[in-house]
Amino acid sequence: NEKLQQLFASFVFDMEQREYVQEAIEWTFVSYPNNDLCVTLFESRPWGLLPLLDEESRLPTGNDAHLIQSFYTAFSEHAHFTVSQLQKKILQFQIVHYAGAVTYVGDGFCDKNKDHAQAHALGFLASSCIDLYRSVFGVTSRPAPSSSKPPQATTVVHKFKSQLANLLALLHTTKPHFIRCVKPNDTMSPDVFDEPRVAEQLRCSGVLEAAKISRTGYPLRFSHAAFVHSYICLCPGVRLPPTDNLRATAHEIIQALETGAFMQPAQPPVVLATEPGRPSFQLGLTKVFMVLSVYEQLNSIRESLFGDRVLDMQRMIRGWLARVQYRRCRAAILTIQSTFRMVRIRRAFVQLRHAMVLVQKVVRGYLVRIRIWHVAAVRIQTVLRMHIARRVVNHRRVHRAMRPVVSELTSVLEYSKQFEMQNSPDTGGRRTVHMDEFSDEDESEDDGIVVGDSDYGWMGRNGRQSSSANAAVAYEVAVERSHQLGVCFERRDDDGLFVVHSVHPTLSQCVDIQSIERGDILVAINNQPPLVQSTLDLQGPHGTLHFLPPVPLLTTFRFDKPRARSSGATPPSVSSNAKAVEVLWLASMTLGVTLRMHPTLKVPQVGQISHYDNPGMINLHEGDVLIALNGLDIRRVEFSIALGLLKDAARPLVLTFESVVDTYETSKLTLLDGSFLYHVVWDAGKLGLALSQTPTGLYPKVVRVNQPGTNVMTKRQVLGDIRVSRGDKLVKVNHQSVRELPYSELLHQLRHGPKPVILTFQKRKRPKLPMTGIR
C-alpha cells in the first residue's frame, strides 16, 4: 500500500509538476504529503524492516524476540516507528502509515516468513498432467545449484519484494488511473456516514491535495498535432502551414478561441473559451494545456457542429445512394421496356411481313391473270368499238339519204301553213289568251300600273316581217357583257354562212334565247360581218361547228329566219317528256360530277356534284340522267361503253342530261347564270307592280310589289309558284322582247293594250325545290 501511495503521489503530484516545468509553463509549486520515509523504513538495506526480517529468518537460531529487539534498536529514532514500554514487554511496535498508525504484534514473524514447501513436492505438482497445476507450480527458471555454496532458502519477504518490483515495473510502463476506496464508518454499518473518519481518509490518501493540484493546474493536455487536428475545424480563418510548424498554428487557434472568432453554435449566447482568474490555455513546447470547463464547452460546440455536418453528409450520401438506386432501377426498367417493345415490334413485324407476302402473292397472281386476260379483253373491245363505229356510219348514211325527203316535207308543211294563214278570218287585232293554260289565281294585290280596256294591238319591234310570204324574217338578240349566247353555229363549206346548228338554252345567259331556232342564219354582229371564234372542236355534216364564247362587251346579233329551209325540219329533241339540261365540259376543268348506273334504265346518272365550274352546271341536279354526248343519243348504249365514250371524247364536250325536276306545259327556261324566266298572265284591273327604267340596263326593273287595294293577279311560273319580287326584270310581253322598245311606249302599251297579256320576268335567284325523281 505504501508503494502504491508513493506511485500515486509520484504520478499525481510530482510528475505533473515536473511536466509543467519541462513544458515551460508558468506554475506555482504545491506542497503535498510524501511517504518516502515510510517506504524507506521498510526497504532500506541493511537496516530495514523487511531486510532484517529476512536476515533473521535465515539464521538457524533466529526467533521473534531477537527480531523485535533489533527493530527497537534500529528504528528507535525513526519518525514513522514508535513503541511504548508496555509494547516492548509484549513484543509489539507501531508504524505510522499514510493512512494512520498501525500496531504490529511480533509473534510468529520468523516462522511465517520461512517457505516450508518441499522442493520435491513442488516438482511433483509441476509435473502433473493437469494444466492448472503445471501453470501454478511450474518452475520457470531456477538457478543451478552451485557446488561451492549450498542453496539459500526462499522466504516470503523475498518473494513479495520480487513480485512488488515486477508490479511497479509494469505500472511505470503504463498510464495508471487510481481509484480510492473510502470507508464511510468503521463499524461496517449501513446508512452511517462518519464525516471525521471520511475526511481523515481523504486527507491521508492525498485526495484533497490531488484535487487542489487538479483545480489549480491543467488536467487536459494535447500534443500540438492533436490540438490542431481537434480544433482547427472550429476556426475557419486558420490555415495549416506548409511546414511542420504546428506550434504557431496552435497559437493562432488559441487566440481565435480566446477572442471568440470561431464557429459559434446556432443558438445564442456567444461562447467565449475563457475561465476567469487564469488563462484557459497554456502553450507548451510540445503540448497544449487546457482547463476542463473550456474543453467541455469546445467539445459541446464541436459535437453540435459535427452532428449537423454528419447529418448533411448522411443526407448527401443517402441522396447519392438513392440516385444510384434510382438509376439502376431506371436502367433495369428501360431494359425491360426495350426488351418488351422489341418483342412486340418483332411480332408485329413478323405479322406484317406475313401479310405483305400474302398481299404480294395475291397481287402477283392478279397481275398474271390480267396479263393472260389482256389479249382477250383487247379483242372484245375492238369488236365492240367496230360495231359502234358501223352503227354511227350507217346512221350518218341514213341521215344524208333522208335530207332531200325532209326538205321536201318541210316545204310542203310551210306552204300549207301559209295557205291556212291567208284563208283564216280576221280577229280584229285582238290577241286571244287561254286563261287555263297560262295562269292560276294569286293572292297578291297591287296598285302599280293601272291599265284600262283598249283595242290597241301589240306588236314587238324585234321582228320585221316582209310583205312577201317567202321572204326571211330578220330579228336581233342582245347579249350583255361577259354573258354567253349558248348557240352552236355550223359554218357551211359551200357558201361560208354561219347557220344555227343547235340551241342550248341551259348554256345561255340571254333572255331572248327562245327566239333563236335551228337553221337561222347569223347575218351580223354589232352591224359587222360575223366572225365566230370556236370553243368547241366538232365537225358537223356540212362544215365545222363553232360554239360562241362569252362576249367581252354588250353585243347585238342579227339573224335571218328563212321561210323555206333547205336543211329540213328541226330534228326531234332527245328528251320529249322532261326538261333537258345541257352542260359544257371545258378542256381545262374536271367534270365535277360522279356518275353511277341507273338501277332501272342502266344509263349514267348523276351521283354527287363537287363543283359548278363548267357552264350549265348550275341547272344540274343529283339524279339527272345523261342522255346525249354532242347530240349523240346514248340511252341505248351500255353503261360501261358510255363511260368509255365519255372518257375518250375530245373536249370541250356538250353533255345533255334529262332533269328530274318537275316541269310545266308552259314555256320555261333557266339561264346559265342561275336566273330563270317565268310568265305572269295579267287579266284585268291593277297589276300591283311599280316599274322603273334603269340607266344602264336593257330591261325595266320591278321596284315595288303588292301594295294594298289591288285586284287579284294570276300567273304561271316555270319552276313552281313564285311571286314577283323587287329586282325582277320585265324582259318580254306576249313572248316579244322589250329590249328595243322605248320605256314610255312600253308603259302606254301596258296601260292601254288589250287584256289578258303574258308578261315574262327574269328572276336572278334560283329557288330550292325538292327532287321528285326521273320523269
Image (cartoon, helix red, strand yellow):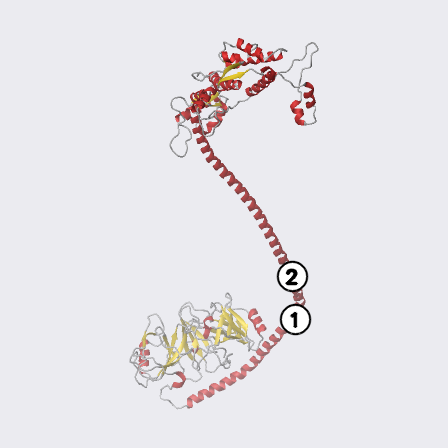
Residue sitting at x 45%, y 84%: 470
Residue tagged by mark 2? Answer: 358
Inspect the image, locate mark 2, and give the three-letter code of the amino acid beneath it. Answer: Leu
Residue 140 % position (x, y): 66, 20
Mark 2, secondary structure of its residue? helix
SS class, disc 1: helix
Q: In this view, does 377 lie to the left or right of 502?
A: right
Instruction: Kindly identify the amino acid type of the residue bearing the numbered disc 1.
Output: Arg
Q: Nearer the viewer, mark 2 or mark 1?
A: 2
N-term-proximal mark, 2 vs 1: 2
Q: How crowded is mark 2: few (under 14 residues within 10 Å), some or many (20 or more)?
A: few
Residue 141, numbered circle: none
To which residue does mark 1 refer? 379
Q: Residue at x 41, y 22 (%)?
A: 279
Residue 763 percent coordinates (x, y): 39, 74
The spot of residue 554 in percent (x, y) is 39, 70
Placement of 419 over or under 550, stated as above or below: below
